[in-house]
């Protein structure tokens, strides 16, 4: 019996149901679901963690409580970076993170999170929903018995906090900076030293001078972290993460067990969350930037053009190397970069040209 | 009986319901809803009309068919510009349009659609969901027994199609252009003659020279309309509509009649549709722009800086006049422009600085 037909017939017989509920229970399809969502963020972490809560609540409300999702912060059920495997196995039904954390599974995952000098939020969502990106992502995660989708985007991040000014390409040489992933690899090619530090050690390392610089997210998260107290030079733009996609991944068996209406609810709740996160980031970054500059007297600085050009050239090499890791990565790269080349032309005459015009 | 409790008890009693359905029908709360959605677009109009279909389908799927929404194109049930009144009265339950069409009801509606030199899509959504914009919009439509929300955004539009080049402010003088709303008022202040034409007359008027120029939407819609055959100069950026919000408005009584889960479904389906439309516009405008330039040999031209500056100054005056029409409009303007001032600072160091860096 299809869920839709069931609802239709059940919908007008409310009075009779409770009496026979117990006896018929064994014969009816499962109609209530308790899910666990494991996340890669500390519980209630601003925007990233609270988006997981928002997503769970949206699904619960739309389903009238037929799906209830308990959200776990990193280390509450499993460590952050075990989330992928735990959901793949079905121990939890749903995960919330960012695809570049799983590059050990396949390098291609990185195209579904953040690419240095890659697409921004609006372009990425266009690629995912209307440019073939989602299909490739689903194909990749299917190998792990998972269904992925986007549930948010950070927008363009900040380049980071620097103890000293960056005035030329030479200033990158020997620079010890906390910058993970592809951005870190690019810095290394520019002569710097990328370091990985747990979140809890970043502030003190920057303050003591053990590191010269760190990137984090954007004004809102960076301010909450107090980074402006450890270094005063706040550089833009975040060339290494120009619009990081955040993801959910759902155990395929758990998803398939849902009736069609609940599947639709889960799917559309994710797209709603995707709109919600970029809106929240934008609104809160606006406010935080103003506070950082006017109250905390942060020096807001653009990276010099020749530094950006150098980083761009090195990024192209590093991203090409990611593509060359395997055939699937090559396929995703072709789709991603093909879409970006076309999207940039439109962005240049629309969003970019408009923002320029507004400032004349 | 709450919907949630009902679902809970009904969900495990499928076998028994059909037998008693008829006798209990009179006592049960209403559980199935047939709605009419009237739109201001021709049926299936690309992106704008198809978004209405998408929204109806999403709601139907998530509700397991408990809400069925029949979408009407303009003039199918009522003319486009009667949609607001028809839903206000409850003859239809839902409408799909753009808030500036209702400026005759209150000038303030225009802040919820498009403002010359105003916010772009990302900033507008941040204002609506996290900056107090939605609350003001709800307050305004409440006077008409309606609940409004955003269901899409066009992104930055194009400035339009011009038979002759625009090289200076003087070229605007005497320019006869199809450009409705606030953009038209700005053109008038610059010495031009804004004209209003029904969609069906635009192409022939431009081709014959009865008008010198027209704006429409962006590459995808403009190409479908064939405007490149009537004028070869395609100007950017769309200073008059830098991110038009599209809306739905729901009859308040119809919404209140829904159980809580269906209310949540309608609300979140709208936010999902909002993400969907900007993604579709971005992807399709990318492709269409390429076709227009490479295949149809369109001359893609930026409006000169002094023209943009002139239009910006005049826009500020025109928008201030909208604010001055009534107290509520003043209140919305204060919220809108306050948010924009802050948002622009963040956009400049994030989206704008990044797009500039990427092009170096």
Image (cartoon, coloured by chain):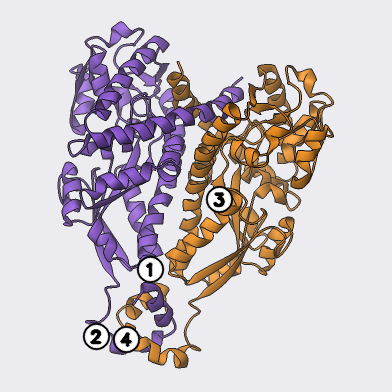
Chain colours: A orange, B purple
Q: Residue at x 47, y 84 (%)?
A: A28
Asked which secondary structure carries label 3, the reply is strand
Q: Label 1: which residue? A: B64
Q: Label 2: which residue? A: B22
Residue A106: x %, y % from top left:
72, 50
Q: CA distance from mark 1 to mark 4?
A: 21 Å
Residues tagged 1 and 4 counted as in contact (Cβ below 8 A): no
Q: Name the image quarter holding the N terminus of chain B.
A: bottom left
Q: CA distance from mark 4 to mark 2?
A: 11 Å
Q: CA distance from mark 3 to mark 1?
A: 24 Å
Do discs 3 and 1 share a chain? no
Residue A233: x %, y % from top left:
69, 25
Do discs 3 and 4 share a chain? yes
Looking at the rendered image, the disc whose residue lies closer to the viewer, 4 or 2, is 4
Name the subunit of mark 3: A
Question: In front: B8, or A187?
Answer: B8
Residues tagged 2 and 3 counted as in contact (Cβ below 8 A): no
Vertical arrangement, residue B290 with respect to residue A259, above or below: above
Of the numbered discs in the image, which one, if any, rests on residue A15?
4
Looking at the rendered image, the disc whose residue lies closer to the viewer, 1 or 4, is 4
Name the subunit of mark 2: B
Q: Of label 2 and label 1, which has the lower sequence position?
A: 2
Vertical arrangement, residue B233 with respect to residue A58, above or below: above
Of the numbered discs in the image, which one, if any, rests on residue A286?
none
Q: Of label 3 and label 4, which has the lower sequence position?
A: 4
Q: Label 3: which residue? A: A150
Q: Quadrant of residue A354?
A: top left
Q: CA distance from mark 3 to mark 4?
A: 41 Å
Name the subunit of mark 4: A
């Amino acid at each position: 019996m299809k869920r839709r037909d069931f609802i239709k017939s059940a919908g007008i017989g409310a009075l009779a149901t409770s009496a026979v509920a117990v006896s018929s229970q064994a014969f009816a399809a499962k109609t209530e679901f308790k899910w666990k969502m494991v996340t890669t963020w500390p519980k209630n972490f601003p925007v990233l963690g609270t988006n997981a809560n928002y997503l769970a609540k949206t699904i619960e409300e739309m389903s009238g409580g037929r799906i209830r999702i308990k959200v776990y912060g990193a280390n509450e059920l499993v460590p952050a970076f075990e989330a992928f495997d735990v959901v793949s196995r079905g121990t939890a039904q749903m995960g919330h993170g960012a695809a570049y954390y799983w590059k050990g599974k396949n390098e291609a995952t990185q195209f579904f999170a953040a690419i240095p000098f890659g697409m921004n939020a609006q372009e990425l969502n266009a690629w995912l929903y209307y440019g073939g990106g989602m299909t490739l992502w689903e194909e990749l995660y299917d190998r792990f018995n998972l269904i992925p989708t986007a549930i948010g985007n950070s927008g363009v991040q900040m380049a980071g906090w620097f103890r000293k000014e960056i005035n030329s390409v030479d200033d990158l040489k020997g620079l010890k900076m906390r910058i993970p992933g592809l951005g870190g690899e690019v810095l290394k090619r520019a002569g710097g030293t990328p370091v990985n530090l747990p979140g809890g050690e970043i502030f003190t390392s920057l303050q003591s001078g053990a590191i010269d610089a760190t990137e984090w997210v954007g004004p809102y998260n960076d301010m909450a972290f107090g980074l402006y107290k450890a270094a005063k030079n706040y550089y833009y733009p975040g060339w290494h993460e120009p619009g990081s996609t955040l993801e959910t991944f759902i155990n395929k068996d758990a998803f398939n067990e849902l009736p069609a209406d609940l599947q639709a609810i889960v799917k559309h709740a994710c797209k709603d969350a995707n709109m919600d996160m970029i809106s929240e980031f934008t609104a809160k970054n606006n406010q935080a930037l103003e506070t950082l500059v006017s109250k905390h007297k942060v020096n807001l600085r653009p990276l010099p053009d020749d530094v950006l050009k150098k980083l761009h050239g090195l990024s192209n090499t590093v991203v090409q190397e990611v593509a060359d890791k395997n055939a699937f990565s090559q396929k995703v790269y072709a789709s991603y970069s093909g879409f970006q080349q076309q999207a940039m032309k439109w962005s240049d005459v629309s969003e970019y040209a408009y923002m320029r015009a507004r400032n004349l």
